[in-house]
Amino acid sequence: MLRTYNAPLVRIYWKILSRPARTGLDICKPVVDGYVQQGSVRTFIPSSRLNKMSDPRFDELTPCDVSDGLLNKYKIDNGGYLPNLTQWSGHSKGTIHGKAYTVLFAPANDTRPSVNYIDSVPQGAFLVIALTRDLQLPYAPYVKPTQAVYGGLMSTRAQYLKAAGTLVFGRIRDLKEHKSLEHPVFSYGVGSCAAKAAVKPIGINVPLEILTSNGEVEIIKPGDYMVGDANGIVKVPSEVELDSLVGYVRKSVEADELVTTDIKNGRPAKEAQKDRRATLKNYL
Amino acid sequence: MLRTYNAPLVRIYWKILSRPARTGLDICKPVVDGYVQQGSVRTFIPSSRLNKMSDPRFDELTPCDVSDGLLNKYKIDNGGYLPNLTQWSGHSKGTIHGKAYTVLFAPANDTRPSVNYIDSVPQGAFLVIALTRDLQLPYAPYVKPTQAVYGGLMSTRAQYLKAAGTLVFGRIRDLKEHKSLEHPVFSYGVGSCAAKAAVKPIGINVPLEILTSNGEVEIIKPGDYMVGDANGIVKVPSEVELDSLVGYVRKSVEADELVTTDIKNGRPAKEAQKDRRATLKNYL
Amino acid sequence: MLRTYNAPLVRIYWKILSRPARTGLDICKPVVDGYVQQGSVRTFIPSSRLNKMSDPRFDELTPCDVSDGLLNKYKIDNGGYLPNLTQWSGHSKGTIHGKAYTVLFAPANDTRPSVNYIDSVPQGAFLVIALTRDLQLPYAPYVKPTQAVYGGLMSTRAQYLKAAGTLVFGRIRDLKEHKSLEHPVFSYGVGSCAAKAAVKPIGINVPLEILTSNGEVEIIKPGDYMVGDANGIVKVPSEVELDSLVGYVRKSVEADELVTTDIKNGRPAKEAQKDRRATLKNYL
């Protein structure tokens, strides 16, 4: 079956083939069990994969809970946290989560053609947009362009396609529309002007390089699992087995609920934490 | 007729006469069809001009709409956007807009005398306050002084004089009072301490130089038309003919409303945008 | 009487003994009329001091009011303002205030042992947490680590111990819990990951060095009086006599209330301020 627009895209594995200098971009080869869309090429995706963009068990977990798991069980020092993002809309929806469907924006004079990313957001996916590294800053406002790369029409379409939410490492506009739609949108900041004079989308489902404020670079790959709320966004690397992570995190949440009850009953926090979290080592 | 306090000020044209080194200030000559106030000189303004500080057609337009017009029709790449401002109050008033009544603050040891700007805010004007360039930063918090240059008493007076709103490229204080008055106030940040030990107002209706986070400098001239909401603030340069801008923007808004309806009916966003916006080129 | 956990701590005077290079930390000797806790040493505090962590007269004053007093009466140019903090919770509680109970976090590989600070927060105190100076930045996000040094369990315990609020010169997590508890929490930013891989608490009731965005360093000593609301946080140095400060600030507030009434009746702001504030010089 050949799909035209509206084809949900899934890419599970990827390989970096080359890193052209000064583009901040990796040229990657997708390796999937179906076909994928890259730029203007439209292809088949097995319908069996459609429901794998979202795992309902994360409805009950916060990014803070998930970070506890990534830190304690997987020894990821920053707990997968992607700093300095604000949630502007969709607060009523609780934890926002889904596999990353990534989009890369490059300077408008980049030689690669512009791509249509918004009409192919997979159902359940977390739409993640970033700029090339040369347009990023390690301090606020975190990106150089003052233009907004995402707006109300895009949220209208993303919501129609049943995306989980949108994350922009840059500026967004049309705050009122995102709130009115209750479509969850996260970004570094806001703007008012469309971005076409500054940047354009040139890659779909490519890895994104995020320069963080502690000077490190985080890579977001298609298929990484994104979890967010007002505290910000956590990335679960695609290498982490979700069953195993969720199993640990649930035990961790249970332990901390007991700690809360202990504290409210007057028990010292340190003692309660040590006691109630003791069993967690069995789940590492 | 000679006016004392409360005289609304209008200046439509201006010319830079000189740029004293290291002051961040332009010395300008106002060219108007009436007289103007500059520093402590109080003069007559024809009453026929009073209603020209505000154009009610902007009630129906957002800064995002206006940026679309400035970008597409006037080829202003950033759509007039002045980045990194927060709206703290007056959200119930919809779009905030009016001609800029500008005030420049310089270091407290500047040799020029302090001026009284707050008692001469024109009806309908957007009060715009900035610091000299040496006090600005291209990254958050965007200004060096931690003191607030604007507070609740100033909003009380600005509202009495029927100003449209206040925009401070710096810090403001007394958040609760601005909210309680529902007087629209925008700024880079907040503070608690009056600024008299750090800065003082030394110029009224002079051009303001704003260092933005992409390293550029935007000039706000008296008479530029300012449009703001929670997305931030857009400057329409006084050279832009408002009739022509509003005409285009209204058509642009109409087209995007059709795109929204299309998307909600399942039409791909890219196709709907291309189709519905096709007629806009007739209004360029 | 020997206290174990839950002992409220008071330290009124302190002296810097040495400043180890590259630690950003001062080694101080507490000088008090009782004993104090430092690190793991638990000691006696006279119960007569317990009620001195909080002064109810500040319930009626805002940080802006207090800054006016520090600026005008004590010639503190920045009015004691500690910039770039956000209040995330506890807004219903009005002005948040209390004497600083300070906690210093150092890099996780610091040789000093970790201390338990949360079980000894004194009743009425303002819990103030900062990182060593090498982990601070003069621009947003103001700290290098992306991890959160404070979370919901800590607020649960701080509230049980009747702390006034929590101020973190860094990131906090569990926004929803702080809001749900209505425990007032201020910080530079948010996060999701516990901080144990990055930093650890190594000193209680030691002075904190805060690098501010104007390039200066503010010292917060245990016993400094902290006052905060949505406008941010003001520090009243312990050298300032509170009776004298409050006396002046009350007169200043009274004068400004008259100015507000004047302005609402149409009187020019400048004239009203000059007139109504004239008597304040009698209270300097």
Image (spheres, coloured by chain):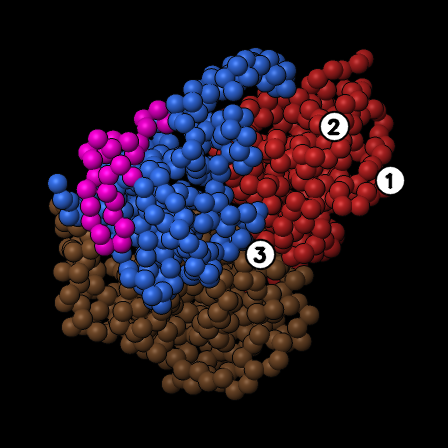
Chain colours: A blue, B brown, C red
Depicted A216 relative to depicted C148: above or below: below
Same-chain check, marks 1 and 3: no
Question: Which numbered circle lies on residue C17?
Answer: 1
Mark 2 and mark 3, same subunit?
no
Evaluate if marks 2 and 3 touch, with contact meaning CB atoms under 8 Å apart: no
Residue found 30% across the figure and 34% down from its top: A53
Label 2 resides on the chain identified as: C
Q: Dot 3 lies on which element?
A: strand
Q: Residues within 10 Å of mark 2 (few under 14, many from 20)?
A: some
User: What's the residue type where badge 2 is placed?
Assistant: Pro
Report the disc number at residue C113. 2
Question: How far apart in space, not on screen, are marks 1 and 2 (Cα)?
Answer: 20 Å
Left or right, C277 with reference to A233: right
Q: What residue type is labelled 3?
A: Ala
- A52 part of magenta stretch: yes
What are the residue bounds of the magenta stretch? A32-58
Rendered location of residue B209, percent (x, y)? 51, 72
Disc 2 is placed on an element classified as loop
Q: Mark 3 points at which residue?
A: B148
In the image, is residue B130 part of the stretch drawn in magenta? no
- Amino acid marked by disc 1: Leu
Give the CA separation, mark 1 to mark 3. 36 Å
Write down the quadrant of residue B106 in the picture: bottom right
Tell me: residue C111, above or below residue A179: above
Residue that appears at 36% across and 65% down: A110
Q: Most prominent secondary structure in the magenta stretch?
A: loop
Whole-percent x and y of residue C14? Answer: 83, 37
Q: Looking at the rendering, which quadrant does residue A113 occupy?
A: bottom left
Is residue A184 shown above or below B57?
A: above
